[in-house]
Amino acid sequence: MTGVTGNPQRAQARGVPRPLVAVMSSGFFGFFAHAGFLQGLEDLGLVPDAYAGTSSGALVAACAAAGLGPRDMLAAFCRLRREEFWDPPDWRETLSLCLRGWRRESGYLRGRAFRRILEAVLPVHRFEDCPRRCLIVALDAAAGRRVVFTAGPLVPAVVASGAVPLLFRAVSRGEELLLDGGLVDKAPLAAAAEHLQPAAMVVHLLPSASLEAPPEHTLARRWAPFRLQARAVDAARIQAYRDQLDWLRPRMPVWEVVSRGLPRLGPRRLSRGPEAFALARRLTVETLRHRARGSRTRDCDKMDLVELSRSQTGPLLGNASCNNGF
């Protein structure tokens, strides 16, 4: 695979080691931003050979590996309505759960509606049928270990990797109790290196919201001890990510795009999704251009990205808009 678009008007990436794997981090409702990241790569003539991700990154990795382009993803995400994936128990069942202290229950949302959406959106439903390789990570809360998916049914793997604790029910598979992969891997760098055998990686990191504010801001808010606990967990996850990144860099080229300052999305805040897409796209292009220029000054054999003009990249949003019915 060349990973370069066939359009001669497109810029082409030269000197990029192959296979190239795109790794996308967890991030609450970060799928718009990850799709924008992939659009930025496409703007630069970079089409990865394989995709890996956790949580929202797993969703976009599955879509990309299955053959959906970034603009296809944007259109699909913009059609999402909260009521289509929000499937809590009815009020009677909720009351019953409260009276028995939520015993034998692992989350609020059932996840069945999310599964139906994935089955409708994904062009293929098995890892083996994807045009490009895909890797997804979830956490097995029963055994306390990461679970790596590279084969078998695609939809259950995405659902498991996106099962945010408290919000979604855990996914049971035999003796495994599967939850959000972002808990064990902010971005699955080591797993991708081991199972996909890349020659290079490009990583999209969505920083956790708790770490973007200064500590004094965390302590000044209501329920400060609980917020500090959440911040500590996020800090541990980012440290584990940095450890994996430091381990990888002597072994292969790794380009990192960190998307800070994006709109914070959620079940009731999806209307700003196209804005997150556009900003992540722009950050990706700017970050990789800058690093390519730096590489040329140090080593002419490193990645060389032809400069893009605004006319070549096209409008950041095109005609996309969101109508989520809120």
Image: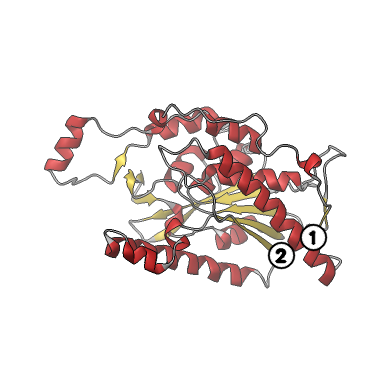
Q: Callout 1, which amino acid?
A: Met
294 sits to left or right of 215:
right
State the mark number for residue 229: none
Residue 60 in view (yes/no): no
x and y percentages locating residue 33 in the rendered image: 57, 46
Q: Are marks 2 and 1 in contact (CB under 8 Å)?
A: yes
Q: Is residue 37 left or right of residue 58?
A: right
Disc 1 packing (10 Å; few <14; some 14–19; many ≥20): many
The CA distance from mark 2 to mark 1 is: 9 Å
Q: Upstream in the sequence, badge 2 or badge 1? A: 2
- The kind of residue tagged 2 is Pro
Q: From what the image shows, is residue 310 above or below residue 248?
A: above
Give the quarter of the figure containing the C terminus. top left
Label 1 sits on residue: 303
Q: Secondary structure at mark 1?
A: loop
Indicate the secondary structure of the residue bearing disc 2: loop
Identify the residue under disc 2: 253
Q: Is residue 31 visible?
A: yes
Image point (46%, 57%), residue name: 208
Which image quadrant for residue 111? Answer: top left
From this view, report whether residue 305 is shown above or below residue 224.
above
Question: Residue at image x 62%, y 47%?
Answer: 279
